[in-house]
Image (tube, rainbow, N blue to C red):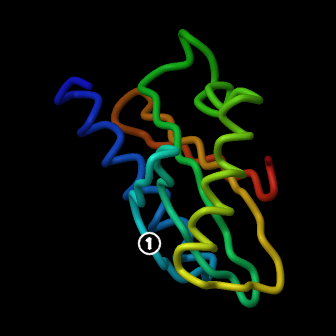
Amino acid sequence: MTTHNRRLGTYGENCATAHLLRLGMEVLDRNWRCDLGELDLVLREGGTAVFCEVKTRTSTAFGDPLEAVTPVKAQRLRHLADRWLEVHHVRPRDVRIDLVGVLLGPAGRTTIEHVRGAC
C-alpha cells in the first residue's frame, strides 16, 4: 500500500470514528488484525456490538466507496466479527456490521455515508 493510500485510509477512519462517536457509539477497538484480516472499527451502541468497515475515496471515478464491499468482503467481515467476539470473550445482545463511505470531494469537502446493518 502506498503512503498516499495509507494516509487516505487513516483520514477516512478518523472521519468515520468522529461521525460514529457523534451518534453516541463507543469505540472498543481500531484496526484489529488476525489471520483472517482486519477490522477497521469495533464499537458498542447500547447492547449491540458494531463492526464497521470504512472505505475512503477521492472521487467516484471507479464507483462509490461502499461499492468496494463485495459479497466476499462482507462474508470476511462476518467471520472477522465472530473471531473478535470469541477472542475478546464478548457476548453482546446483538451484533451488526455497518459500512461507512468517506468521499473527499472538491475543495476539501468530505461526505460521509453510513449504512447500518449493511452486511
Residue at image location 62% in from the left, 26% down from the top: 68
State whether residue 19 is above or below residue 10. below
- Res. 90 image quadrant: bottom right
Quarter holding the N terminus is top left
Residue at the farthest bottom position = 46
50 displayed left or right of 96: left
- Counting every numbered tag in the picture gives 1
Residue 49: % across, % down: 68, 76
Residue at image location 77% in from the left, 65% down from the top: 96
SS class, disc 1: strand
Q: Which amino acid does label 1 sit on?
A: Asp
- Res. 94 image quadrant: bottom right
119 displayed left or right of 11: right
Residue at the farthest top position = 61
Residue at image location 45% in from the left, 47% down from the top: 35
Residue 85: % across, % down: 63, 73
86 displayed left or right of 27: right
State whether residue 13 is above or below residue 102. below
The residue wearing badge 1 is 29
Residue 34: % across, % down: 44, 53
- Which of these two is toward me, 33 or 100? 33
Residue at image location 37% in from the left, 58% down from the top: 14
Residue 18: % across, % down: 45, 68
Q: Residues within 10 Å of mark 1 (few under 14, many from 20)?
A: some
